[in-house]
Amino acid sequence: MARITMREAISQALMEEMDRDPSVFIMGEEVGVWGGTYAVTKGFYDKYGPKRVKDTPIAENAIIGGAIGAAMVGQRPIAELMTINFAFSAMDYIVNQAPKLHYMFGGQIKVPMVIRAVGGGGRQLGATHSQTPDVVFAHFPGLKVVSPGTPEDAKGLLKSAIRSDDPIMFIENATMYQIRGEVPEGEYTTPIGVSKVQRSGTDVTIVTYAKGLELSMKAADQLAKEGIQVEIVDLRSLRPLDMGPVLASFKKTNRAVIVEEGWKSYGIGAEVSSRIYKEAFDYVDAPILRVAQKEVPLPYNHTLEQSALAQVPDIVAAVKEVMK
Amino acid sequence: MAEIINMPKLGFDMAEGVLIQWSKQEGDTVKKGDVLADIETDKVTVEIESTVAGTILRLLVNEGDVVPVTAPIAIVGEPGEDVELPVAGDNESVDVDAPITKSAPETPSQTQDKPAPLMSVGTAQQERSVKASPLAKKVARDKNVDLANIVGTGPGGRIVRRDVEAAVASAKASVSPSTFTAISHEDKIVPLTKLRQAIGRRLTEVNQEVPQFFVTHEYKMEAVMEMRTQVNSILPEGEKLSVNDFVVKAVALTLREFPNLNATLADDKVIQHGAVNVGNAVAVEGGLLTVVCKNADQKSLRQISLDVKTMAAQVRAGKIRPEDIEGSTFSISNLGMYDVEHFVAIINPPETAILALGSAKEVPVVEDGEIKAGWRMKATISVDHRISDGAEAAQFMQALARVLENPLLLVV
């Protein structure tokens, strides 16, 4: 096992799939000559050339619309959105075209497309460039939404996404490119739509994904010192949502905290807790709590921004509350 | 306008109460219904609630003081209000009929200020439903534990799994052999609670003054057990009937035929009570209390079950209303849940008789010369010989057998 960064893991996935399948190509702003805003595609332009690593105008409509067209005629485009906040400019294509074409044309058309989008706050990019609107995309049937929390999952899930015949939103977190983790040597894929227990425990279940996983792991370390053994279930994909490991864990611990980076209202916590109450009502020993971003546009000021985002102490406090 | 809060009269024979603890201090603001203090009487400890909103201007008695009923204990009004106050500890001198304000209530409300609704099952249940997590309810169901007996340690007193498991564990621990621990040879002095003292006083009187005799009868319980299984299969969780519920109703109906056993001796007369109010002995911390199922002969099995269950839960939780524990005309003491063959209870004065129930058990019985399995329960009645004789008691026990062996009589 190699210990690599999230950036390297995503980069490896892209390169392996481009090597494997000539129909795979990348398009987006600054993905080519510049090597990607977050340096994920560094060296790709030189290796694969301008036909397979396409720099585009600053026009998200064109990026996603073009990618859909390419996918419809048999290519496997990977469209990169510099930030997920720019997805709103291409919203009709993302939620109204890509997920529905297969359905509306009676299965004659497939849209095997991956949209790589970078989200998350905490980097002082202001209210319009710091959002975590993952749940918005997970709302639409037909669009799969995947968001990894470890380098291993990032690589395995992205490879599965590229090979999938469905349109997939692959959401990366801007503050997680540098985190390191063990990644298996050689070829592997990770199935989409399968939640995973990332840490075993007995006392309380944290359900989370992506940035929430990183924070929850730290919170779990702190809580372990106080004798509270946290089990962490990483959703990894928001649609399809795999409740199996969540319910199994909850039936063991009977208490849960749901951690997400985005806003609480109508969020993943609401969805997951509702499903737990429905499927495991007789196992509920305390109200399920949610940890999420404060209900404000994310501030630019560093201190304010950090206090608006969910932090490790918030998770620790919620776990202690739910353990009462 | 300042108002006086008085020592409540919590029972017919209550003359005084001990103010155990103030929950509020002078200067605190209180809302109507806020707990002001804990009061202990012979029988119970209850919380006294404020009947008015305002600021506590004066606390008139100290913690630990013995206070006669209706004497003022606190004054609630507006801050800075000028009031003529009786001196603390000088309660007797205060004329409660002419207090500083006109509307001082007779007794502050206790834990519940409405009388229990007797007719509406739904309402009574909502008001007294046990607060427990879904998991705690499930575990309690699985382990056959009554949540009403458990004190919750979750937020807001919610019963959570650990509480149910602790209750199960302690029940087990009490019967499993104790592990070796170093034995302390120090004597331990435990003061008797007021309740314990009251029980001792009253039952000593009974044993000294009442010539009691005892009659034991073995009841065939197959019909009751079968009917109970049938009925419980259609009743919702939490409303299942117990064997005790059947016995209460059967006793109440039978007492109608034996008014002499539903009676009180008054010098050279016997008062045969018009109502059949069946007391049920309930073990509480530091003693036992009798919760009274009033007019049990008139009530459905379900209503009896609900009454007894809810009142027992309340008294176990320390929330005791005088009307729940007074006015019984005949009592039942049931140790069936402890695997008891049979036992003898002491009459609960001023009643004439008490029925002690052992466990309903599956035992070998002889019928038509054949040994087979049957359900049997032994019960022993203790009777005041000044009022009744063995023959009457034995006939009562036989009449009770008729009802218990034909439990359809309980529903017609």
Image (cartoon, rainbow, N blue to C red):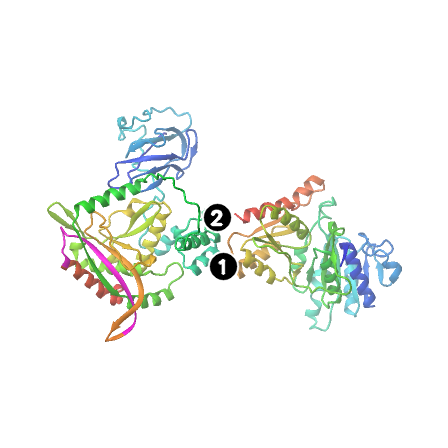
Q: Is residue A302 left or right of residue B193?
A: right
Q: Where the C terminus of chain B falls, by quadrant?
A: bottom left
Camera-side residue: B282 or A211? B282
Q: Which residue is mark 2?
A: B154
**From where the camera sits, is residue A39 visible?**
yes
Is residue B167 rendered magenta in the image? Answer: no
Magenta part of the chain: B371-390
Give the residue type that dot 2 points to.
Answer: Gly
Distance, label 2 to label 1, CA atoms, is 17 Å
What residue do we see at 53% from left, 58% from top? Answer: A277
Quarter of the image where one finds residue B376: bottom left
Quadrant in which residue A18 is drawn:
bottom right
Crowding at dot 2, Cα within 10 Å, few <14 / some 14-19 / many 20+, comes out as many
The kind of secondary structure the magenta stretch mainly shows is strand
| Residues flagged by tags 2 and 1 on a common chain | no
Residue A282, disc: 1
Task: Please give the name of the residue rendered at 87% of the width and 59% of the height, measured from the top-left corner.
Answer: A45
Going by the numbered disc 1, the residue's amino acid type is Asp
- Look at the image and tell me in which quarter the N terminus of chain B lies: top left
Rendered location of residue B246, percent (x, y): 29, 61
Q: Position of residue A248 (x, y in %)?
A: 57, 61
Whether residues under marks 2 and 1 lie with C-beta atoms below 8 angstroms apart, the answer is no
